[in-house]
Amino acid sequence: MLTNGCARTVEFEREDVGMSLSAATGRRGVPPRVVLTGLLAALAVGTALPAGAEPEMPPPAVVVAEIAEQEAGVRANFVARVEAIEAVDVRARVRGFLESVEFSGGQRVAAGQPLFRIERDPYEAQLASARAQLARAGATRTETRDALARSRELQQRGTLSEAALDQAVAADAMAEADVAAARAAVRSAELDVGYTAISSPIDGRIGRPLVTRGNLVGPDSGPLARIVQLDPIRVVFSVRESAVVSLRQAEMVGGPPSDTAEGYLFRLLLPNGDEYPHAGALDFIDNEVDPSTGTVAIRAVYPNPDDVLAPGLNVTMLLTERDPGTFPVVPQAAIQQDREGRYVYVLGDDETVSRRAIVTGERTTGGFAVTEGLATGEVVVVQGIQRLRPGIQVRPNWAEPP
């Protein structure tokens, strides 16, 4: 409320302004609008801020979060493919008409189980002929052996020449060679008879028969069926060549052997989203780098008692550390990066912020593991970072826990 003296002063100033305005408007060449603007500016001088004074701004509001500790081991996903450890194309080793097919397509077969039968009669006849030739060669060998014995006795008595003895020795040797050839022919004929019964060379699951009964088959007639081993089974995936080099270098300085991967778990995610119930083990790392992709193939072996995995199936390899360590985990939104590396803004007890360089490790569900620069329980800024500079005071608001 204005006092009486102040009221009189304001009225006096208004009267002065009115008289000045009347006087000014009476002058020639001075527009009334210009005179009014100048008078209003003169009245505003009394309410202006002192020279050099600035309005005080409130501290910027930021969102902060406390650093928590979590397990942060190596976790990686890879596109993988299932392949059979052993696969066999069943073929005929002798020529003949197929007499029988002794399996159903898709069934499990064991090593040694009969699959096909080729007519045996022609090969049994060849076997009988080979055995007869062996008997004849054996008889001739007996004759030449006896003749050689008599020739040596006569030569000792001086009634037989050296040339005749040499002929007897040569005849006996030829007869022995004929016996060996006849025995080989018998063995070959026996093998041919055995090849008329085609058996499974491995345990696995057989596909449909590609040739039916009554067809002429032979070594050049193509596969008769295909068998693949399903238990155990192998899964192959590829990693960057740099990762394999790092494993080899770690092995050189005393780390775990790169061909065992004892510190990792090899789990599978099936195409329907379910996790495969059986764990795998590293089989081997390929010895060549694929030049088109710059990756190295790694193979793991899995038990497959229920035939859930089939060759050619696409799955996801989940590679994790068996015993992951615990590290402070910083939210991803808090991490900034420049030429010097990654950093965060840390909130102090006096609600001022400071810049802190950090070294991050593996990614986790809550952000990134920090191997250097932060400790559990410290508070970092996760929102409003763009307005910050080291040393300024802020108004912190706590982020909701994830």
Image (cartoon, helix red, strand yellow):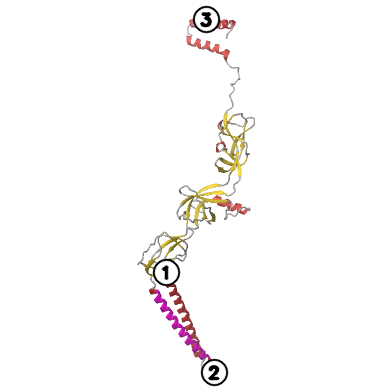
- The one nearer the camera, 19 or 392, is 392
- The one nearer the camera, 146 or 337, is 146
Answer whether labels 3 and 2 touch (C-beta < 8 Å): no
Assign the N terminus to one quadrant of the image. Answer: top right
Report the side of 302 relative to 206 (left or right): right
Q: Measuring from the top left, give residue 179's x and y in whole percent.
A: 47, 81
**In 3D space, how far apart are the residues under numbered discs 1 and 3 (Cα atoms)?**
133 Å
**Residue pointed to by mark 1:** 197
- Amino acid residing under circle 2: Arg
Nearer the observer, disc 1 or disc 3? 1
Q: Is residue 203 visible?
A: yes
Report the side of 12 relative to 192 (left or right): right
- Amino acid residing under circle 3: Met
Any mark on residue 157, and which? 2
Q: Measuring from the top left, give residue 272's x and y in whole percent.
A: 45, 48
Q: Earlier in the sequence, mark 3 or mark 2?
A: 3
Any mark on residue 19, and which? 3
The magenta segment is: 123-152
Label 3: how many residues lie within 10 Å, few (<14), some (14-19) or many (20+)? few
- The one nearer the camera, 174 or 122, is 122
Reply above or below: 203 against 357. Answer: below
Q: Measuring from the top left, give residue 99's x and y in whole percent.
A: 37, 68
Q: Measuring from the top left, give residue 50's x and y in whole percent.
A: 60, 17
